[in-house]
Image: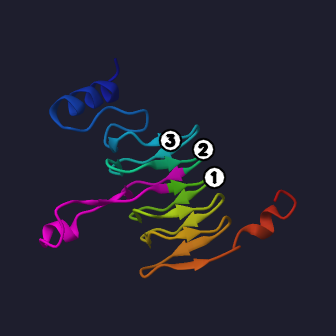
Amino acid sequence: MNDLENFGKLFAEHTHIKQNRFHPLVWINGEPEIGENVYIGGMSEVNAKGAKVVIGSNCDIASFVAINCADSHKKCLGLSDKIDARDITIGHNVFIGSHSVIKGGAHIGHHSVIAAGTIVDGIEIPPYSLICGNPMQVKTSYYSKYFKDQK
């Protein structure tokens, strides 16, 4: 066992974060469905507790990204007795830049790019889109010109 594998094992033993195939400092909660050839950078979180989270194949998720199906603000304020959890779907070939947040209810179409620092609301986003900013802006079909023969 190399040092990184040993670190991952020790980290999992001393936290509630289970070992995963991505990086020892990627937090995966629940049972998300994650496709093939996916990269998830360190210090990122995929929270699928209480909802279905699907990440397609060939995705590149940078470090410090939060993909979180849960929203607990109403419970914290005493407005609800439960945490609101909503499904998240990320299509194939999606890039998610560093320090982005993907909120419950988001459906991101294939071949889309989430710019660094973007907070993605729980809406449906078409394929080939560029999503950037806070508040987010969706530039639909931004990348479709590169795939005009493949649609």
Circles 2 and 1 in contact, beta carbons < 8 Å: yes
Residue 139 image point, x, y percent:
62, 78
Magenta residues (range) = 60-88
Compare marks 2 and 3 and give the one earlier in the sequence.
3
Distance between the Cα atoms at labels 1 and 3?
Answer: 12 Å
Residue visible at 33% across and 37% down in the picture: 24
Residue visible at 66% across and 59% down in the picture: 111
- Viewer-closest of 64 and 101: 101
In the picture as drawn, the residue positioned furthest to the top comes out as: 1
- Determine the secondary structure under disc 3: strand
Pointer 3 residue: 34
Compare marks 2 and 1 and give the one earlier in the sequence.
2
Q: Give the residue type at disc 2.
A: Ser
Q: How would you rate the neighbour count of disc 3 (Cα within 10 Å): few for under 14, some for 14-19, many for 20 or more?
A: some
Q: Give the residue type at disc 1.
A: Asn
Pointer 2 residue: 57
Residue 5 shown left or right of residue 126 in the figure: left
Residue 98 image point, x, y percent:
43, 61
Distance between the Cα atoms at labels 2 and 3?
Answer: 7 Å
* The C terminus: image quadrant: bottom right
* The N terminus: image quadrant: top left
Q: How would you rate the neighbour count of disc 2 (Cα within 10 Å): few for under 14, some for 14-19, many for 20 or more?
A: some
Residue 77 forms part of the magenta stretch? yes
Q: Does residue 56 sit above or below 21 in this rendering?
A: below
Residue visible at 52% across and 55% down in the picture: 89
- Determine the secondary structure under disc 2: loop
Q: How would you rate the neighbour count of disc 1 (Cα within 10 Å): few for under 14, some for 14-19, many for 20 or more?
A: many
Circles 2 and 3 in contact, beta carbons < 8 Å: no
- The label on residue 93 is 1
